[in-house]
Image: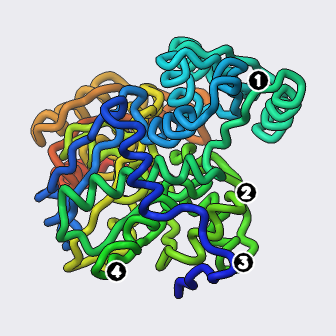
């Protein structure tokens, strides 16, 4: 994807000087998050990977930067009346937290189906939360109506020059910490983060490639830039970048400054979340793992490069995280469910369990099915969940069961 510079008659409204001014403005109220080299992930992908841990912000996401930069530029009258936004995600929490800290009233409109934990977290940061509509569009329309009615200032989550400048401070810190970086890999939802980071990258005195990452289920910016019409929708792990309509302003930045956009599948997103927890000991949401997911998906594209990527958020539901980790164990062969056909007679299960014992495999759960089966009345299906050391260990168990004349199959994940 060839970048096209903004024309002189229609320049981009954010420059690196705006980003530098934003950094001076937000100062120490934002955590300067660490940038660390990951030797293990570098060995795994063939790239030299540096990770910026924006999941260590107070609200666990980079969104604080743009929200604070915007709040600090409001005049006294606007501060007194307060601000409003439509968001069920990290933008809501960042705006709520810094609004409360600065004494600016914050109202957040969320769809009625927003998970309770997100409502309580946002209220916990001092915002007034209004639940309206079944979709984001309905919530956004209500927020706009309240803006007009109450005189609030609407703070857009991404399509605003002040937001973009604030998010760009991520790249200032990243490139100061690691001047050798030649490639930035940045998640794209609405496009605010990549717009700000690309503004900084393309203002350097050396070439830096900027690669955006979207979930395959939500290729909205990809569609906008490439004039394609791939569908946007579905349940993605990367809900933080599940945006059906990217910003008009951010689309201009992406078209002018971003070199390419990579689309990543759900399996790679799950793998990236799991690897970051296991290797870097850090919790990230699906959107936060998108950069690593891109490098896992297309290793040849990044091999040999010095890559900087951003863990842009760490707000993931704990039950969802548990599911992701268990699914990763299953895919790697360390957790498995085997389906066996047995005869319904004394000792049948004992004899099977003996083979598991001989192979050093731990049995976690056993499920007997006698009724809802197509087998004869004296037959039964048994599912056994078990824990092995690795894929080879599981293969040895299956071989041993088949040698003992058991009919066995593995219940596979999607």
Say few, some or many: other residues with alpha carbon within 10 Å of mark 4 (under 14 / 14 to 19 / 20 or more). few
Side of 134 relative to 404 (left or right): right
Q: CA distance from mark 2 to mark 3?
A: 13 Å
Compared with 207, 137 (above or below) is above
Q: Residue at x 49, y 52 (%)?
A: 165
Q: Position of residue 45 (x, y in %)?
A: 23, 68
Side of 38 relative to 381 (left or right): left
Q: CA distance from mark 4 to mark 2?
A: 27 Å
Q: Residue at x 87, y 30 (%)?
A: 148
* Residue 6 shows up from this direction: yes
Q: Point out the tag, 4 or 2, that comes first from the N-terminus.
A: 2
Which residue is denoted by mark 3 in the rendering?
Answer: 228
Which residue is denoted by mark 4 in the rendering?
Answer: 301
Q: Residue at x 37, y 74 (%)?
A: 298
Q: Position of residue 283 (x, y in %)?
A: 32, 36
Quarter of the view holding residue 299: bottom left
Say few, some or many: other residues with alpha carbon within 10 Å of mark 1 (under 14 / 14 to 19 / 20 or more). some
Compared with 285, 113 (above or below) is above
Which residue is denoted by mark 2 in the rendering?
Answer: 245
Side of 225 relative to 19 (left or right): right
Q: Point out the tag, 3 or 4, that comes first from the N-terminus.
A: 3
Which residue is denoted by mark 1 in the rendering?
Answer: 112
């Amino acid at each position: 994807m060839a970048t096209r510079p903004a024309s002189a008659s229609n320049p981009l409204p954010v420059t690196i000087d705006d980003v530098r001014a934003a950094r001076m403005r937000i100062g120490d109220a934002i955590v300067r998050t660490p940038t660390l080299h990951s030797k293990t992930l570098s060995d795994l992908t063939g790239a030299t990977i540096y990770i910026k841990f924006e999941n260590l912000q107070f609200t666990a996401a980079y969104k604080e930067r743009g929200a604070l930069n915007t709040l600090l530029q409001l005049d006294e009258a606007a501060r007194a009346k307060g601000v409003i936004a439509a968001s069920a995600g990290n933008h809501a929490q960042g705006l709520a937290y810094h609004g409360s800290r600065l004494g600016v009233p914050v109202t957040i409109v969320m769809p009625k189906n927003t998970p309770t934990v997100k409502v309580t977290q946002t209220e916990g940061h001092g915002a007034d939360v209004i639940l309206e509509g079944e979709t984001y569009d309905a919530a956004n329309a209500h927020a706009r109506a309240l803006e007009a009615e109450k005189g609030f200032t609407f703070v857009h989550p991404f399509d605003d020059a002040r937001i973009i400048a604030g998010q760009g401070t991520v790249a200032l810190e990243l490139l100061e910490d690691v001047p050798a970086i030649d490639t930035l890999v940045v998640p794209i939802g609405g496009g605010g983060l990549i717009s700000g980071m690309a503004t900084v990258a393309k203002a350097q005195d050396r070439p830096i490639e900027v690669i955006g990452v979207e979930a395959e289920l939500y290729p909205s910016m990809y569609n906008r830039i490439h004039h394609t019409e791939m569908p946007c929708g579905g349940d993605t792990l990367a809900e933080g970048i599940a945006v059906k309509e990217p910003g008009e302003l951010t689309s201009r930045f992406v078209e002018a400054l971003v070199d390419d956009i990579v689309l990543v599948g759900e399996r790679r997103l799950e793998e990236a979340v799991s690897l970051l927890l296991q290797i870097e000991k850090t919790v990230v949401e699906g959107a936060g793992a998108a950069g690593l997911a891109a490098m896992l998906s297309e290793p040849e594209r990044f091999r040999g490069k010095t890559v900087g990527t951003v863990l842009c958020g760490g707000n993931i539901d704990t039950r969802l995280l548990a599911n992701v980790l268990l699914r990763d164990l299953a895919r790697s062969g360390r957790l498995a469910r085997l389906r066996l056909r047995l005869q319904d007679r004394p000792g049948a299960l004992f004899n099977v369990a003996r083979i598991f014992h001989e192979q050093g495999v731990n049995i976690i759960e056993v499920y007997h099915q006698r009724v809802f089966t197509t087998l004869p009345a004296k037959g039964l299906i048994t599912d056994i969940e078990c824990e092995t050391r690795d894929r080879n260990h599981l293969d040895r168990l299956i071989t041993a069961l088949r040698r003992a004349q058991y009919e066995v199959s593995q219940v596979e994940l999607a």
